[in-house]
Amino acid sequence: MLARPGYRRELVSFATLPCATALIEGAVVSILAKLHFNVTDVQFATIIAAPMFANITSGLWAKLLRGRPKAAMLALIQGALMLLIASIALLPTNEAGAAALVAIIVAARCLVAGMLNVRSVIWRANYRRDQRAQVTGRFTVMMALLLAVVPLAAYFPLNEKPELFRLLYPIGAAVGVVSVVAVAKLRARREQSLLDFERQQHAEPFPQQDPA
C-alpha cells in the first residue's frame, strides 16, 4: 500500500520519458548527424560510443548523489536532460552545430547514467526484495518497448526530411517533462535515515538494506 503512489508516478514516468530519450538513441541521432549536420567520422563514432562513455561516469554519480535527496535529484537530472534534448532543435547546421550536437549527446548520455543510478536507490528503498524484481521488470519492459517503437517512428520522417528535427526534438522533450513532474512528487521511504547513513564518514554510498 505504501509503495502504490510511487509506483503510479513511476508508471507515468516510464510511459513518457522514452519519447524524449529515444531521440538520442543511435538509430535516430545518427540519421540527423549524417544527413543534416554532416559530422566527421570521428564525431559520428563519438555519438555511437556515447553510451559507453556514460557508463564510466557511474562511480562519479554515486559520489555526487551521496547525501542528497534522491527524488529531487532524479527530477533535476531529468529536467536537465529535457533541456539538452530540446536544445538540439536550436543548433545551426554548420561545423559549430555538429560539434555542439556531439557534446549534447555525450552529456545527455551521462545524465541518463545518473538517472539510472539514483533510480536504483529509490527502487531499493521503496520496494521489498520480493516485490522489486516484478515491479522493476514491468518498468523495464515498458521502457524497452517504447525505446523500440519511438525511434522507429522518428527514423522515417528524419530520413525523408532531416529538417523536421527542429519540431520533433522540442515535442519529445515536452512529453518528457511529464515524467519530470511525476518523479518530482516521488518519495523514497525512510529517506532521512538513508541520507544520514550516506553522510557518515567512510560510509558506503548506499545501505544494503530492504525496507520493512
Image (cartoon, rainbow, N blue to C red):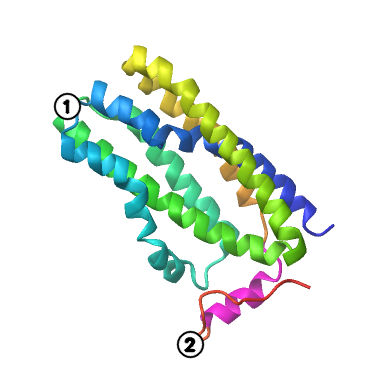
Q: Which residue is mark 2?
A: 201
Residue 92 horizontal side relative to residue 12, left or right: left
Residue 126 horizontal side relative to residue 44, left or right: right
Q: Is residue 75 above or below residue 148?
A: below
The three-letter code of the residue at mark 1 reads: Asn
* Outermost residue to the top: 160
Per the image, label 2 sits on a secondary structure element best described as: loop
* Outermost residue to the bottom: 201
User: Is residue 104 at all visible to an observer of this figure?
Assistant: no
The three-letter code of the residue at mark 2 reads: Gln
Q: Which residue is mark 1?
A: 94
Start-end of magenta stretch: 188-199
Residue 103, horizontal then vertical, whole percent: 26, 44
Per the image, label 1 sits on a secondary structure element best described as: loop
Q: Are marks 2 and 1 in contact (CB under 8 Å)?
A: no
Which quadrant holds residue 192? bottom right
* Outermost residue to the right: 1
* Residue located at (27% from left, 36% from top): 101
* Residue located at (71% from left, 52% from top): 135
Q: Quadrant of the N terminus?
A: bottom right
Residue 207, horizontal then vertical, whole percent: 60, 77
Instruction: Give the dominant element type of the magenta stretch: helix, strand or loop.
Output: helix
